[in-house]
Image (cartoon, grey):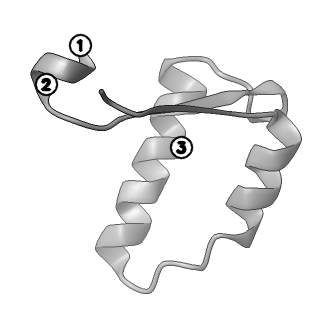
Amino acid sequence: MSNSLVVLKSEIVYVVGYAMKPEVSSFMASFVEGLKKLYITKIKGFDLNSISVATLLFEGTKEVSC
């Protein structure tokens, strides 16, 4: 038997969590974070003020989890 977990976050929880995220200390990490935000907002067209996030976690072997 495998364990599964689904976590849903509203836009408020996501924004607060993002605001509390520690600042990155290296140029490369800051650059990658900027690329992630650019991809989500400009390329995919998501509005960070009205986004919901879901996290899926499946534990166990591939045969059991699928």
10 Å neighbourhood of mark 2: few (<14), some, or many (≥20)? few
10 Å neighbourhood of mark 3: few (<14), some, or many (≥20)? few
**Mark 3 residue element:** helix
Q: Nearer the viewer, residue 1 or 36?
A: 1
Say which of marks 3 and 2 sits in front. Answer: 2
**Mark 1 residue element:** loop
Which residue in the structure is indicated by mark 1?
66
Q: Amino acid at mark 3?
A: Lys
Q: Is residue 16 left or right of residue 8?
A: right
**Mark 2 residue element:** helix
The residues bearing labels 3 and 2 have C-alpha atoms spaced at a distance of 31 Å
Q: Earlier in the sequence, mark 3 or mark 2?
A: 3
- Residue located at (74% from left, 27% from top): 51
**Percent x, y for residue 2?**
32, 30
Which residue in the structure is indicated by mark 3?
37
Locate residue 12: give its quadrant.
Answer: top right
**Percent x, y for residue 48?**
74, 34
- Residue located at (73% from left, 59% from top): 17
- In the image, which disc is placed on residue 62? 2
